[in-house]
Amino acid sequence: MAVSIETVNVLRLFSSTSTFFYLLIPAITLWYIYFRISRKRLYELMSKIDGPPGLPLVGNALEFIGDPHTTFKLLYERSFEFEFGKPLKIWIGPRVIVFLTDPRDIEVILGSHVHIDKSPDYRLFEPWLGDGLLISTGEKWRAHRKLIAPTFHLNVLKSFISIFNKNSRAIVEKMRKLGNQEFDVHEYMGEATVEILLETAMGVDKKTQDREASEYVLSVMKMCDILHLRHRQIWFRPEVIFQFTKYAKAQERFLNIIHGLTNKVLQVKKTEYEKKKKLLLENEPDFKIEDKTENLKSEKAEVKIDEVKSNMPEEPVIGHSYGQAAGLKDDLDVDDDIGEKKRQAFLDLLIESAENGVVLTDKEVREQVDTIMFEGHDTTAAGSSFFLCLMGTRPDIQEKVVEELNTIFKGSDRPCTFQDTLEMKYLERCLMETLRLYPPVPMIARQIKEEVVLPSTNAILPADTTIIIGTFKLHRNPEIYPNPNEFNPDNFLPEKSANRHYYSYVPFSAGPRSCVGRKYAVLKLKILLSTILRNFQIRTVKDQNDWQLQADIILKRTDGFRIILDPRKKAKVAI
Ligand code: HEM
């Protein structure tokens, strides 16, 4: 029987295809057996930690494909199926993520100098923030942190007070034009915080800013949406897929706007710096720029930042200081070599340090500027917006704040001083309580370097596990905060906070990688919010229980931060 050439070809193809599959199937089986055996200990350890059951291969990944509000609600509500405070695990494909909400466990991670690595999820920020302070690790992070932290020292911040006042008055005047129509206050807070950051930390004046602040704020919000989408829907994570989506094009557009502003700021400051240097050299040819970074050049730049005392205070340490337990100290509280001497503001110091490129390159300066611009504005915009909405829902509390302000200012329209901010004890409690209920950073993610034993349950977490500190849930533990969902500034009365675990309140994180802008944020917010409350009575229509939250990196309201302002009697802006 004659066999056609086509048939021979088909048979050849069939036999080579089947050989391929004969080899592939055992190879996959062997790889899978090796994969399971090499992860045996991980599976054993994780079997001792509670968590929702997942599907084969994908784990719990499909639970996060909804919109940001639904996902956040679902995640939060499902967590109540398990005992409060116990560690909780979820599987995203082969990757396990452990959520911690017990202050003792949180202290082990945040208080450590070893577990300072951010989780791989932060890498999605790279095209935007590069390897800036929020993301970097190891010696690079240590050296840059040591350089940057002093630029947010109180001595520097005090010199910003007039700028905080001026901008707060400007925003009041802008809001006055709205009359008593309902509006989204987040837009106003976002723009105000960007403008304030540019004038303070970056040291550029209003003329440089044009209309760019509002465009910048909008682009940051959209970028957060894209990053959050990639966090939730893991198939968008690999660059090979992402680059072909409409989101990649949008990201490019938003990054152009974001980097456009930061590049412009850098250009202005560098030209200014060069001019100043030239002038100084002309007048004093022997003048040398003092190198303030000498001590950072050593490979082993050590940061002695954790005076962090462990666990519960032996002697109760009263109250809170700039957003963290008074007994906790970080590098923002260290008064070492420079003391009362003049310190430099953020960008001035960075540009000077980049002169010889030893501590910092030009690229690194840009990355730090992008980081501070993002971390410094979106967080405070959310915090202040939540504060104002809460004031609207609780007129009784609002009036107590205003009474305190009347006692301090005695009806005068004068600007706020540093001493005034120290006297705003009740306003500060309201701010702390706002950040408890609505922490702008609702989750902090780390990748642990070594095996960790959790004090709460003795559960063991192997090295390389991703940990999420669930600030939002931690702050609503009924054993720590009775009636945890109620807005109650008395939670921060000194006697109430005195016996609480230091790590039971961490809106600014804590330990060596705590928020570098903590004091800046609290000081600025006190001036901004008090100026608004001295001028307006705030109303809201929506009840606090009906707010819709979304945790797209920064906690926000999907239904908008809508408030109505009524001018207070004799309302006049402080001059
Ligand atoms: C209410 C306002 C703020 C809140 C609630 C807040 C909260 C936080 C939190 C929780 C972290 C740790 C994030 C993490 O580990 O993933 C952090 C880090 C950071 N924050 Fe803030 N922040 C605020 C304002 C600011 C401001 C005003 C600035 C700068 C002007 C700033 C700059 C930074 C930087 C640079 C980091 C990274 C620090 C490091 O890793 O060494 N933040 N912030």
Image: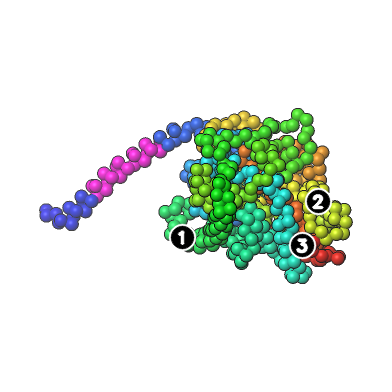
CA–CA distance in space, label 2 to label 1: 52 Å
The residue identified by callout 1 is 245
Element type at mark 2: helix
Taking depth in this image into account, of 56 and 418 the one nearest to the observer is: 418
4 relative position to 498: left or right: left
In the image, what residue type sits under mark 3?
Thr
Give whichever of discs 2 and 3 has the lower sequence position. 2
In the image, what residue type sits under mark 1?
Thr
In this rendering, the answer to whether 553 lies above or below 575 is above
Give the residues in magenta. Answer: 14-33
Color scheme of the displayed model: rainbow
What percent of the width, then of the height, locates residue 329? 69, 37
Is residue 31 highlighted in magenta? yes
What percent of the width, then of the height, locates residue 235? 47, 52
Q: Look at 73% across and 45% down and name the residue there.
A: 322
The residue identified by callout 3 is 540
